[in-house]
Amino acid sequence: MADVGLMTRKPVADIIAEGGEGGGHTLSKTLGPWSITALGIGCIIGAGIFVLTGTAAAKYAGPSIMLSFVVGGIACAFVGLCYAELAALLPVSGSTYTYTYATLGEIFAWIIGWDLILEYAMGASTVAVGWSGYIVSLLRNFHINIPPQYAAAPWTEAKLPDGTTVEGIVNLPAAFIVLLLTAMLMGGTKESARLNNIMVAIKLFVVAAFILLGIGYVNPANWHPFIPDNTGEFGSFGLTGIMRGASVVFFAFIGFDAVSTAAQEAKNPQTDMPIGILGSLVICTILYVAVAGVMTGLVPYAQLNVPDPIAKAVDVIGLTWFSVLIKFGALAGLTTVILVLLYGQSRIFFQIAKDGLLPRMFSDVHPSLGTPYKSQLLIGIIVAVVAALTPIDVLGEMVSIGTLFAFVLVCGAVIYLRKSDAEVARPFRTPAVPVVPILGIVFSLLLMAFLPLATWMRLVIWLIIGLALYFAYGSSHSVLRNGLRGQRPLK
């Protein structure tokens, strides 16, 4: 009987009803299709273009990093079609967590919710550390020097102006940007979305300018060989290198799934969500391929394993003013990524608390601001502390596998709900079911297989901690299992 309880499903009708209920646990509907698309672009275009593209080209794929982005984009297209159906069908804030609750049941919903906490929190912390590096570099151009030991995590080396090194103490700029954006998000979704729209416009201008200016300076010889020969090591160039590159740069695509967390705040989720999810994905994939092509055409791929590969490529063009502009664009890009990840994280936390699996206080919505301020504050403090004290390489390795795991369950949810709740009207329908969801599952599992073993081990440890928390608190406080409303065991 206990097993049946753990697999209790949340009825689709109850989830749909939540999207329109009133009271102190309901989010304000303030976002239109452009704001939702901009949320996706704001999260997708960031660390992927400004940091990871160069690393993946230098270490794994060479000029064929362009194909890695195509593979990642195709995988995301299949998954994105599934997200679009579920976000329009179930317009609430829980994203994959909510979809899993409706299909596989409570225990799996908790597992994926806990997994998403890892993905979003570690992702925001990773990008905050990258933001810190860019702001320190930019301020130096204006003769403002932040002591290196206060812009680096403990046990990491920081260079002083005289060339000597000191041990990092705390990354204050990383913590600062997280807390600043947390305060803005607590102040109102509409205001935060407006800031995001402005910054998205800035970084789109910078990215477009890089493509248009850089293409005239491309040296086609840098694209040969387009697919460098494999070194004899799995994942080091050749075809396996393209796939390893795709699994690494996949971090750059996580923004479109964050869009689904905004469903409950969309003015017309049935049309706005598919537009936002698929629109942001298509725009960003095209830009990624174009940027990767120009970058590897300007600089030999072996020289791109640097924290600021676009800035290095701009140096080839020889326009100093544009290098400063690129840093401003990178800061805008990374800022919007942090903003959207913090936003998405708090909405998932909000929904889990609303279901009783976390303390109910975290589902409180501020009466005048209309935001889940308590969950937003808690998430902001945790992410700020992690960003201030953890090296970027440790953080970055913990994100992609959680995203891909969530994608597998989203695709499975579409197939399941088409059978279990076939009678429910679907404003947007994923085409060619079950072929498209199955392809999404296959591509996601394939990319997971190319991730290092250490990444898998960290995921397992995190999930064990999550299960312990569920059985210690969530299982006994679950609204669905401990109330009679709408209980339905998994068929």
Image (tube, rainbow, N blue to C red):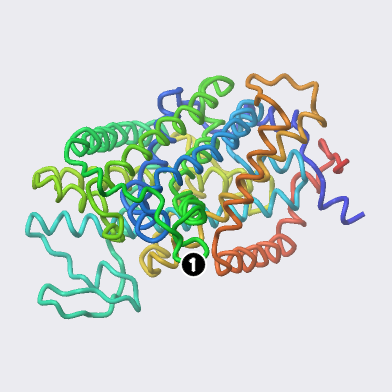
**Direction from residue 234 to residue 218 in the image, left or right:** left
Q: How many labels were placed on the picture?
A: 1
Task: Name the amino acid, label 1.
Answer: Gly
Residue at the (37%, 40%) spot, across then down: 288
Residue at the (76%, 32%) spot, across then down: 417
Under tag 1, what secondary structure? Answer: loop
Residue identifier under label 1:
232
Q: Position of residue 432 (x, y in %)?
A: 69, 26
Nearer to the camera, 294 or 153: 294
Quarter holding residue 153: bottom left
For the N terminus, the quadrant is: bottom right
Crowdedness of circle 1 by 10 Å Cα count: few (<14), some, many (20+)? Answer: few
Quarter holding residue 261: top right
Question: Looking at the image, which residue sits at the far right?
Answer: 1
Residue at the (31%, 43%) spot, across then down: 333
Q: Position of residue 300 (x, y in %)?
A: 26, 54
The answer to whether one can see residue 182 in this image is no
**Direction from residue 145 to residue 334 in the image, left or right:** right
**Direction from residue 232 to residue 214 in the image, left or right:** left
Residue at the (41%, 51%) spot, across then down: 227
For the C terminus, the quadrant is: top right
Q: Position of residue 62 (x, y in %)?
A: 37, 53
The answer to whether one can see residue 95 in this image is yes
Nearer to the camera, 232 or 265: 232
Q: Position of residue 190 (x, y in %)?
A: 40, 31
